[in-house]
Structure formats: C-alpha cells, structure tokens
Amino acid sequence: MKLDILAIGAHPDDVELGCGATLAKEVAKGKKVGIIDLTRGELGTRGTAETRDEEAFNSAKILGVSSRANMGFADGFFVNDKEHQLEIIKLIRFHQPEIVICNAIDDRHIDHGKGSRLVSDACFLSGLRKIETVHKDKNSKQDAWRPKAVYHYIQWKDIEPDIVVDVTGFMDKKMESVLAYKTQFFDPKSNEPETPISSKNFTDSIIYRARNLGRLIGVEHAEGYNVERYPAVDSLFDLK
C-alpha cells in the first residue's frame, strides 16, 4: 500500500506520544498514514506484550491510520545491523512513503536512539537499487525507494526542534490515542509498579509541551521535529 507518511517507533505508544497529533491532522487532510512498531514492548514494566498488541490496535483505529504493523524485533536488544535494516527496507519499499517519521535522535530509553539510527540508515539504503529485496506478497523483486524526508519526533528529553508543526485542534485525538494504552499511563486505581511514564505529571507534560511549542510559534498546540537535511521553502512568505 502506497503511503504518504510512515511513522515508526521502537515501541507501541512511541508514535502516539511523539507525533500523534501531526498524524491525526494529516489523516484529516486525506493523507494515507501508516505506523510500524519495531518491538512489542515486551520488556515494559507495566502490562504485557499481548495487552500492548490490543492497545496498539485500538490506538490505530482512533488515529484513523491506514495500516499498522509490528516487526517483532527484540525489545531492548535489537541492533542496527544488516539483518534488521533489510527488514525495514522491505517495508519502506512496500509502502513507498514520501515522508518517514521516527524516534528521537537521542533519548533516555536506549531503544529510541537505536531505533532512530536504524530507521534513518534503512531509509538511505532503501534507495540503493543494488540492494535486492523481495515483495512480501507478490514474491517479486522490489523497486528501490528513498523517502523525500526523514523527521525525528521528540520524546523524553527536551531536544530543541528544528521545525515545529501547528497541531491546534488535534490534541484531543492525540491524547485519546495515547490513553488507549491503558496499562502504561496514569491510573490511580492501578496496582502496577510506578514507572517514569505512569505518573500524572508525565501525562500532563504531553499537553504542556505541546502548549509551550505552540506558544513559541503563536498557536495553541504544536509538535516539534529534528531534521536530517536543511528544510527548504520556495519563498520566505511560506514560513509562518
């Protein structure tokens, strides 16, 4: 399936937390959006891989994305090597996205930085025609494909963004998709162990980060991204 945007996260819920409002906005504009989770989050302190599977499915329905897949890589232990790169390349060539959005360039969780580099490298390699891969459904050779842009969302660390996207009007949809992960986030009735993301402060931080980025560009809410190359505009008047 040809996609406009392919959003990739090391764990189920990474995409929702990092760029959920952006995806919801693009879906509302008629863009085809897909999500790939690299792992099932099986090492997470709260919940199980099975509950994460269900939560990811429910969250995808809320966002209205066209597809969601899980690579089944080992949570905490996947590496940026040829084997893993080729698996990502196959999906990039299958979906032929114009834009790929992936994990933060650096973060508290080691999988986030690893996932960022793995996806970025795979996006480049996917454009090399001498790397041969086979279509997963048609059993035929895939065409080379390189996304026009790779963007990195921001996660735990407050990394300064290179670009900021106005997501005013889509934060409710983002929060609904995030809170679909019922086992992971703040629930005063839960008997699960506390984690850095299970506090009310963390849930509140999703909103106040978006409000602060929005304040800085003169809108209600925004999400920030890091870029791998200079963003280009046709005119200075294209910038808000």
Image (cartoon, helix red, strand yellow):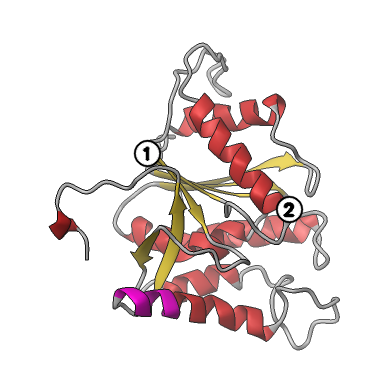
Which mark is in front, 1 or 2?
A: 2
Q: Residue at x 26, y 46 (%)?
A: 232
Q: What is the magenta segment's predominant secondary structure?
A: helix
Which amino acid, mark 2? Answer: Ile
Can residue 216 be found in the magenta stretch?
yes
First-in-chain label (1 vs 2): 1
Local crowd size for mark 1, using a 10 Å CA cut-off: few (<14), some (14–19), many (≥20): some
Asked whether residue 10 appears in the rendered view, the answer is no
Which residue was labeled with disc 2? Answer: 110
Q: Which mark is residue 98?
A: 1
Q: Residue at x 36, y 63 (%)?
A: 165
Asked whether residue 160 appears in the rendered view, the answer is yes
**Front residue of this view, candidates 186 and 63:** 186
Looking at the rendered structure, the number of numbered marks drawn on it comes to 2
Expressed as whole percent of the image width and height from the top left, the position of residue 36 reads 58, 45
Expressed as whole percent of the image width and height from the top left, the position of residue 210 reads 45, 75
Expressed as whole percent of the image width and height from the top left, the position of residue 225 reads 45, 58
* Local secondary structure at mark 2: helix
Q: Quadrant of the C terminus?
A: bottom left
Magenta stretch: give its range: 211-217
* Local secondary structure at mark 1: loop
- Above or below, comparing residue 213 to residue 52 in the picture: below
Q: Residue at x 51, y 57 (%)?
A: 153
Q: Which mark is residue 216?
A: none
Quarter of the image where one finds residue 192: bottom right
Which amino acid, mark 1? Answer: Glu
Can residue 17 be found in the magenta stretch?
no
